[in-house]
Amino acid sequence: MSGTLAQLAPSRLRTAAFAPIGEEGRAELVESRIVQAISAGAFTEGERLPSENELSALLGVAVVTVREALGLLRHRGLIETKRGRNGGSFVCSSHGAVVEVNARSLIAMPRVALADLGVHYETISAACAEYACTRATAEELEVVARILAEARDLATAVWRRRITEVQLELAALSQSVRLTNEHVRLQAEFTPLLSLQDIDAAARDATHESLAAQIAATSRGDAGAARAIVHDSVRTSVRWLAECRAALLAAPPGVELHATLEQRRTER
Amino acid sequence: MTGTSGTGLPEAGAPVVDELALRRAIGEVDAFFDGIRAPLEAWLPELIELLRERLADGRLTGAQLASLTESGAARVLDTIDRPIYGAGYCASELVVSEGNPLAWWQGLERNLLASSTFGPGQAAIDLARLEWYRVPEATGEFHVAGPFVDYLCSNEITITTSMPVLVDGEFWGVICADVLISSLEEALLPALGAIPNATIVNAGGRVVLSTDPDLETGDRTELDPDGATAGVRAVSKRYPFAVAAG
């Protein structure tokens, strides 16, 4: 009987082992890395990016790949390149441009992929929360709670950055490097989409309250509650994004993207 | 020693805890961290003098801070007999006006932490959440933070030793040296090895290293309010660590 196993078509594991280490699409990978960073607020308006040679060294790709990626970013209107003495590539990430990039990513993503990203993110976050329940100290949680409280009334873009930092800090309180790294990767993908909700004050408040509740549950050592809070928060966000996506897709041609998004705005 | 029978062997069921062994173990912990503190103490006056000179012309940018700090940090990394993974200076806003306040080198290649190479305006790290910055700033004293997941620098479980840079009563930031727990294991597990179920904990009760098979780095142990535990322990007088057994 064991002989028949050897004759089966190659398993997925074997195929994955020998899949080409992508030479194609590297410029797009570099582009999407920088797009994510820009839309996650890693750079400020007008900030100069490292030179082509520096980026090539930092990212571990050929200079020609960097050049291609910068061209793609210019095409999207996310960077401007100036020549001459004080030349270089500068991030022109007006809030509007960033929102547009994120909305287009949402539209381009199949709904099933959006939901699955939510599942992945929720699983890692919930696992970190569970470990934090048995590993975090009261002092560490007080510090995070204070940062969260102080962020409440900040301008939206700054608030989103603080929230993202709080989520990362909470993940790190699991004392697991692997889980924290996974969380960082997922945040890089998910945050640009999550930030589309920020136009809706009710959604912002819900996110904020959820984090406060998660910290409280963690302080009590209540892993079940912490996990449930993470689950509900992510599901709520995915639902908001799925509705937004549907509205964007349903918008009649000629209706500007920003107009459709504006319909989702609520104020306190 | 308690619980020995006439043969010198422990009575069945009686715990045997060697207080001398615990004190020897904490002595090893002290000696280890003395060797981390010393290069920082040696660097401090030199760095202060360099800073005083340069600050006469106004505050620095992150890039200027990095070039000023580089050779001092390299000398800390050169420390022999100690596995120092990363070293550098995190300046306060009295010193750096723009750019990255963290001038940090780490790893075998002694790479400058990538974010330092970015230009001005790099979204500011909120230093308040970092124990190795926040505590010396508040207390004005030397501190050892960790073990913790150092997602900012080493990306490993790390212990960061930090010394405040105090000039004329002003807080100018901290100089630090990182040791990875993986390196600490090599250095200190032998010292613990002789003691069954021995654990090094930090002041918060977090496990640093343990020979107890049920405990891993990062686990939380319970401390009584006055710092005593049920087991026997030896507490370091210089660093926020204790060795407990049983």
Image (tube, rainbow, N blue to C red):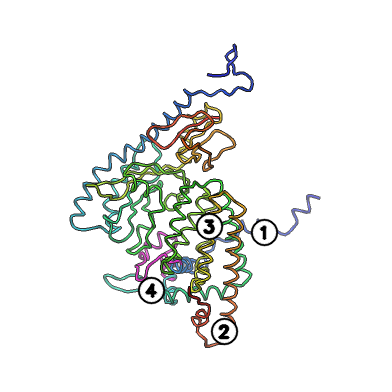
Residue drawn at (60%, 73%) of the image: A242
Give me the C-alpha separation between circle 4 and circle 1: 43 Å
Identify residue type, mark 1.
Answer: Arg
Do the residues indicated by labels 3 and 1 lie within the same chain of the protein? Answer: yes
Q: Which residues are magenta?
A: A40-68
Residue on which disc 2 sits: A251
- Callouts 2 and 3 close, C-beta under 8 Å: no
Q: Is residue A185 left or right of residue A66?
A: right
Up-down relation of residue A150 to residue A260 (above or below): above
Chain name for mark 1: A
- Callouts 4 and 3 close, C-beta under 8 Å: no
> Which mark lies nearer to you, 2 or 1?
2
Identify residue type, mark 3.
Answer: His
* Circle nearer the N terminus (4, 1): 1
Residue on which disc 3 sits: A183
Residue drawn at (38%, 63%) of the image: B123
Residue on which disc 1 sits: A12
Q: Is residue A59 magenta?
A: yes
Chain name for mark 3: A
SS state under label 3: helix
Q: Is residue A265 magenta?
A: no
- The extreme top residue here reads B6
Give me the C-alpha separation between circle 3 and circle 1: 26 Å
